[in-house]
Image (tube, rainbow, N blue to C red):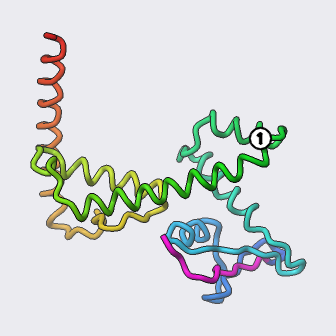
Amino acid sequence: MAGDATPLLIKRYASRRLYNTETSDYVTLEDVAAFIREGREVQIVDLKSGDDLTRQYLLQIIAEHESRGESVLPIDVLTDLVRSYTTNAKSVVPQFLAASFEMLREGQSKMLENLSTFPNPMASMPGFEALQRQQQAFLKSIMGGFAPGGRDEDAQDEDEKPKAKARDGDDLAAIRKQLADLQSKLSKL
């Protein structure tokens, strides 16, 4: 997921308003989050002092999403992060987190590449398309909207939406039946 080479410069005025220097207009914190989800690198600086405030605002975006119930970070991870600030482990934690997210990005790219280039023997299984759409939506939400090869549900024609929902319902019923059959076979064993 490559954004522009130069970060989008946003200046914070004394009134705490954020100013997008590319479009010459004021932006909100949610706008900044949207830029990041689109793959842009963002740098937020204080107009008067020149201090880099990017980290502070990124943490604020995360805190707001978490407080609205859009939880991504499990309590154990948050606890470990707080604990890392008070121990000698803090020198290891940033490198570990950076490496983990890089592996996640690489794994997602490889998985999506494999899904799109090789014929999948499971593709003939009832409900596979619905499962694939769910996986792409999940990956899209984790990685901030980046899911190459995925079809945007909002891009469907209005006429296609009812048909897709009906197909999804049929697929879901078929999956439930298969699951029930498997459970009964397992219970017999």
Circle 1 crowding by C-alpha within 10 Å: few under 14, some 14–19, many from 20: some
Q: Looking at the image, which residue is at 20% across and 67% down? A: 158
In the image, is residue 149 above or below residue 126? below
Measuring from the top left, give residue 7's x and y in whole percent.
Answer: 64, 79
| 53 to 115, vertically: above or below | below
| 144 left or right, relative to 92 | left
Judge by depth and name the residue closer to the eye, 16 or 179. Answer: 179
Where is mark 1, residue-wise? 84
Looking at the rendering, the stretch of residues picked out in magenta corresponds to 1-12
Q: Tell me the residue at 57%/68% (across/down).
A: 36
Residue type beneath disc 1: Ser
In the rendered view, does 74 fall on the left or right side of 157? right
At a point 85% along the width and 78% down the height, the residue shown is 50
Quadrant of residue 160 in the image?
bottom left
Residue furthest toward the right?
Answer: 49
Is residue 152 placed above or below 41 in the rendered structure? above
Number of marks in the image? 1
Quarter of the figure with the C terminus: top left
Percent from the top left, x then y, of residue 94? 71, 52
Q: Which is nearer the eye, 7 or 115?
A: 115
Q: Quadrant of residue 69?
A: top right
Q: Quadrant of residue 19?
A: bottom right
Front residue of 2/107: it is 107
Residue 124: x %, y % from top left = 9, 49
Q: Name the residue rendered at 61%, 74% in the picture.
A: 41
* Rendering coords of residue 8 (x, y %): 64, 80
Q: Nearer the viewer, residue 85 or 53?
A: 85
Q: Is residue 77 magenta?
A: no
Q: Is residue 3 magenta?
A: yes
Circle 1 SS class: helix
Is residue 147 toward the left or the right of residue 176 in the image? right
